[in-house]
Amino acid sequence: MSYLVSIALGPVQDFIAAARRTADLYAGSQILQELSKHAAQFLHGKGAQLIFPAHKDADGANKILAQVEGDPKRLAEETKRAVQKRLLELWNETIGKLPADYQKLINHQRAQEQLGSFLEFYAAWVPLPSVEAYKEARLQVERLLAGRKALRDFLPTRQNDDGVPKSPLDPSRAAVIDPREWANASIPLPDGSYRPLRIKANEYLDAISLLKRCYGVLKSQTVVDTRTMARRSWKPEAQPEERWGEEEDHIPEPQPYFAILVADGDRMGDLISRQEDPEAHRRLSETLDEFAQAARRIVPQHNGFMVYSGGDDVLAFLPVNRAVACAQALSEEFRHRVRGTLSAGVAIVHYREPLSISLENAREAEKAAKNGGRNALAVALHTRGGAPVTVVQPWDGLTWDELLGAYKTGAITRGLAHELRDLVQEWRDDMRADYLYREALRILNRKEARGLKIPFPKEDTPAYRKALLGFVDQLIIARFLSGIREEEAHAGTGA
């Protein structure tokens, strides 16, 4: 008898985001992709007809849908064991590259216990009597899977680790190393050189965090760190090896901000639900995989670094002055290839800000784009010590190019936005909106920014004040998106 089986692997967002370094973040996404791919390959090897992903070698599908024959429960259990085995293999392959003296410093018993309980594996299945019953069967199996995921699995309250420091990246797990013994730890790269693990004295890493750190360092030749990404706004060819000083030094960057882009397809559940049979769903799966591959080409074309691309999800680091253009290119590719819309959030963050906080800022920006009506771009500025500023616009109504061009040509000075903000905040609601507009034009003329288009008052004064404040927010963000270095910004104001 045929069954429709749905499998989900996790944790996803928490696992990927639990990182202090770009290499950790990249490692989390790659490990998850490797485990998901292994699950799909195992099912395919057992005779399952993959639907999502469409092919066994597709990347990024942490959720799997397949048509199987025989006992679905036994197959799900075998798949779980195969994925757990692959995780242990990744651990042995990665940790095995450490010098022997450091391998001896790991509490391997605790590490094996943590690796054995780490993976979240959920499965559900329903009979599939015919192709005509596919649509209803898929809805039913997804409801069952969602219900299973809603049930929490509780680990034992005692894990025989009393008195052992908890991991800062996963406080539910105890450390498997004493970081004070790892200050000088390094790992050999394929070219024969050694790369430091940079384990700080307070990084009591658990097994998963240690795996990510070592895996990420081994892949470090393909990873672009946040400081280098900030530098690429004015030096596009910058590479990590060219940085002056170390990450912990006090040498200032002339432009210390970079962008994190998070993008996600809109109403994908509805799009999937419209597929009437497995073949139609499989074609959609192929299309989403093609978009993911295209995204991996688009991001580097904008001097960025792709952290994760799977299906309709994208997570990437970009220079601030290429972030909007890259987001637009991804949106166009998604619209053209998938025949759907994409919402994206771009967070402009300082390269020294904790990575976990910066990632959360980017995800909040993506939520703002979704909440703003979808099919939109939200750009959020997070300066150090300043209040966040966010602007949401639909893709067909973006107005960033004019402002970015004006900053690059020097047509806008640094103080213009702040002077306009002071004007709007001082303007009372009982004063005329057209007078506010004329006063704003006067400031533009005095600042020699006559060609700049500001909102025209079409509504009452309170509504116009809100619209003008939105324009001011966009002016403030645009200065950072332009990639202007600090000395250039000060020169523009005579400071």
Image (cartoon, rainbow, N blue to C red):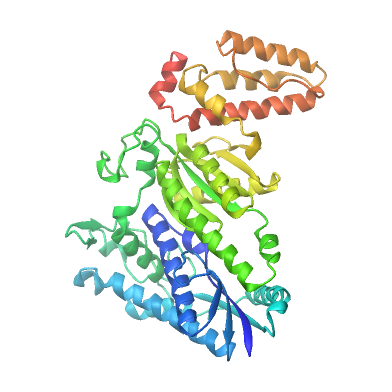
Q: Total of numbered circles in the picture?
A: 0
Instruction: Please state, as top left, top right, bottom left or bottom right, where the C terminus lies in the image.
Output: top left
Q: Residue at x 52, y 18 (%)?
A: 412
Question: Hey, which quadrant is residue 163 in on the image?
Answer: bottom left
Residue at the spot 62% in from the left edge and 12% down from the top edge: 443
Q: Quadrant of residue 151?
A: bottom right
Q: Nearer the viewer, residue 186 or 377?
A: 377
Where residue 486 sits: x, y (%)? 41, 26
Position of 361 relative to 111 (above/below): above
On the rendered structure, is 121 left or right of 355? right
In the rendered view, would you say 433 is above or below 236? above
Q: Quadrant of residue 368?
A: top right
Which is nearer the eye, 336 or 139?
A: 336
Q: Position of residue 446 (x, y in %)?
A: 58, 8
Q: Quadrant of the N terminus?
A: bottom right
Report x, y in % for residue 383.
51, 36
> In this view of the protein, which residue sits in the foreground, 308 or 245?
308
161 shown above or below 394? below
Q: Is residue 265 above or below residue 274?
A: above
Instruction: Say whether residue 387 is left or right of residue 439.
Output: left
Residue 368 in sight from this viewpoint: yes
Residue 234 falls left or right of residue 5: left
Residue 166 in view, yes or no = no
Residue drawn at x 53%, y 46% is: 330
With 153 as the anchor, is 106 left or right in this view?
left
Residue 94 in percent (x, y) is at 30, 70
Residue found at the far left of this picture: 192
